[in-house]
Amino acid sequence: MMKDVSEMYIPTLDDMLAAHERIQPHIHRTPVLTSSFLNELTGAELFFKCENFQKAGAFKVRGASNAVFGLSDEMAAKGVATHSSGNHALSLSYAAGRRGIPCHVVMPRTAPQAKKDAVRGYGGIITECEPSTSSREETFAKVQAETGAEFVHPYNDPRVIAGQGTCSRELMEQTGGLDAVVAPIGGGGMVSGTCLTLSNLAPEVAIYAAEPEQADDAARSFRAGHIIADDAPETVADGLKVPLKDLTWHFVSNHVTDILTASEQEIIDAMKLIWKRMKIVMEPSSAVPLATILKNPEVFAGKRVGVIITGGNVDLDHLPWMAG
Amino acid sequence: MMKDVSEMYIPTLDDMLAAHERIQPHIHRTPVLTSSFLNELTGAELFFKCENFQKAGAFKVRGASNAVFGLSDEMAAKGVATHSSGNHALSLSYAAGRRGIPCHVVMPRTAPQAKKDAVRGYGGIITECEPSTSSREETFAKVQAETGAEFVHPYNDPRVIAGQGTCSRELMEQTGGLDAVVAPIGGGGMVSGTCLTLSNLAPEVAIYAAEPEQADDAARSFRAGHIIADDAPETVADGLKVPLKDLTWHFVSNHVTDILTASEQEIIDAMKLIWKRMKIVMEPSSAVPLATILKNPEVFAGKRVGVIITGGNVDLDHLPWMAG
């Protein structure tokens, strides 16, 4: 059910700038780290924007905070709602908590206990559904009908995209200029925000999206010229399984230079390399950009490259290089 | 074979200041991180000085660089030497490499291959010995006789202590003042450097040393009033197994407020908590301070407390909370 572009509200530079002012009290201006070891290894000059240090552990708090704090008092009073078991659920719960309003999260009853605990730890109110799309939609509709809560989509929402765009604005200020930026792509929220900001403020910067080979629907969409959505891709980069939607497709198809992919092993190796050399804890999804840079050195050699480390919420008891 | 204090050269504030100027081109001014979650949990305001982000992955590069770059050209030409299989070996190799001189490291042939590879990765020249004190001493004497290399002790050396003292100078500048500092204690190099700096520049700051219960020789020495050296303590905090020596005992006995201890499980829990909430990779040794703060909330509540995260060199394939 793709809507025509003409029906969508496409967020603008002004929306991103307003978002940045709105969310600043609620987010960290995360640091940009460099590694002389990784620079030597890649032949590029890499600038890692560390959203793993962000509030709630991921960049998603930018978009979620923009949506929550942009609501009128009347709308806010009814709360917000989403269906997610990942970083968006944590981030929306965090932002709603900061505003003192309820956040309803519909989550399959089969979701890991740790994820439920994390959402509750940020104040989210969980309604469980069966692990099927129909049950999720039915349950979500019921929650929304009962509460009147405002739905905040994890990525296909202009408020969310404007919020995510604040990340690359900071990155440009912190580095003083780049030749390219590489961000992981799942539903395309971060990449769309990056496109929004850079196409306006620094159109000379090439934007690369990085995707797991095993969930390469965005890369195939990009080559085909229309959205291809996979059913249930399996990848260690579990934040990147969701498909593009109309709004993110608009940004990706218009502003992305290329979409590069990496294998599961390449992603795990890149993740371990970052942990080992940079001493930071980050998610498998966040390692996909470095994996693609290592795989395509000719694209990045000699260039100043921003790399978005999207989040740090990882299960320390089940790291992907561990057996079992 | 403890020497009398009168025979030792005790490093001074001027030595620390000179060290800081000397090593600045070769080290990072590491960031100070905070965590609102850990502040709430402890009731204190914690400032984590992140030497896990330091060159070679540990604070030890401060002392090692001061020793290496303080040598005359004539002495430097013969290189430096040490016996260590830990962070000091890495750090001395790194510093020697920056000066372009050889670094000889005597290491038991039974040391893990990963540790040998890491030292070689920084340019260190390894001479293997049998895993016994007599073999190590014999081998080291031979290496020194053959090369004329300058011995740099991992901690009981005024040049090393002056170098380690630069860490708390930065911490004070970065935080604008503290009520207390907590640092892990093994041989006492970091704690001695902290004492050197704070007793001169900020004598109002209480200095706490944090030690594993299972390697609590410093705590027992502190209460007894003389050095007690254990034979071969076993602890997950493997950087903290070595005993105090005359020079570090001088600083510890004169300037430390108290030495607090934590159990193995408390250390592992604190380490995992820091990884999970702060998204940084750090060593078990570096978790001992937080473990003791969590165990003694009444000592730190309401205070501004500096916490030294001493290093980040950890085997990602064998994390202490993993079975096997």
Image: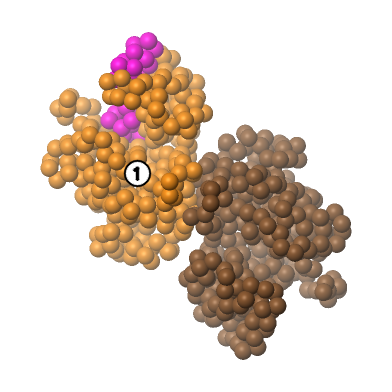
Chain colours: A orange, B brown
The front one of A150 and B264 is: B264
Where is residue A23? Give x, y as percent.
43, 32
Label 1 sits on residue: A237
- Residue A158 appears in the figure: no
Residue A141 magenta-drawn? yes
Q: Which chain letter matches label 1? A: A
- Residue A297 appears in the figure: yes
Q: Is residue A13 above or below residue B78?
A: above
- For disc 1, the neighbor class at 10 Å (few under 14, some 14 to 19, many from 20) is many
Residue B83 magenta-drawn? no
The front one of B220 and B17 is: B220
- For residue A283, what is the image quadrant? top left
Q: Residue at x 53, y 51 (%)?
A: B324
Q: Residue at x 64, y 55 (%)?
A: B237
Image check: A75 left or right of B118? left
Where is residue B268? Give x, y as percent.
61, 47
Image check: B111 left or right of B188? left
Outermost top residue: A146
Type of amino acid at the residue the image marks with label 1:
Ala
